[in-house]
Image (spheres, grey):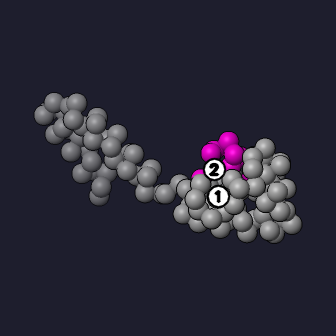
Amino acid sequence: MDSDLGAKVKKLRISKGLTQEDVAKALDVTPGYISNVENGRNLMTLRMLAYYAELTGVSLDYLAGSVDKTYENTALDNEIMALVQKMDADDKEKLISTLRIWAK
């Protein structure tokens, strides 16, 4: 999640003309909880973020931030490594030969 979630939540609330009390009532939490989120002392649960997104008319990924693009590459790398580790030496040689062809 974005490290500036609290600031984003506060800015969005203010831009929609909502008070902390309005948001707290809509989300069935206390105004203190909203204050703590806005000041970075609490994080919203995924469920709470979804309700807040609906309340303010934004997407959940706008609030939560986007997924780090390197994560997908890392996950793919990990899957490849796991599969290669299961191969015997002959299959690894075949794979290397194939990869050399594709890499050209």
**Badge 1 is on which residue?**
37
Q: Tell me, for residue 44, which label it has, or none.
A: 2
Please identify the quarter of the rendering in which residue 16 is found.
bottom right
Is any part of residue 59 visible from this angle?
A: no
Among the 4 quarters of the image, the one containing residue 94: top left
* Kind of residue sitting beneath label 1: Val
Question: Mark 2, residues whose alpha carbon is within 10 Å: few (<14), some, or many (≥20)?
Answer: some
Q: Establish if 91 lies above or below 75.
A: above
Identify which residue, 18 or 67, lies in the foreground.
Answer: 18
- Is there CB contact under 8 Å for labels 2 and 1? yes
Q: Is residue 18 magenta?
A: no
Indicate whether residue 51 is drawn in magenta: yes
In the displayed structure image, the side of residue 89 where residue 82 appears, left or right: right
Element class at badge 2: loop
Q: Residue at x 33, y 43 (%)?
A: 78
Residue 64 is situated, as x and y percent measured from the top left of the image, at 61, 55
Q: Is residue 22 above or below residue 84?
A: below
Residue 32: horizontal and vertical position, in percent? Answer: 71, 56
Inspect the image, locate mark 2, and give the three-letter code of the amino acid beneath it: Met
Q: Say whether residue 54 is left or right of residue 99.
A: right
Q: Is residue 102 visible?
A: yes
Region of the chain picked out in magenta, as a range: 43-53
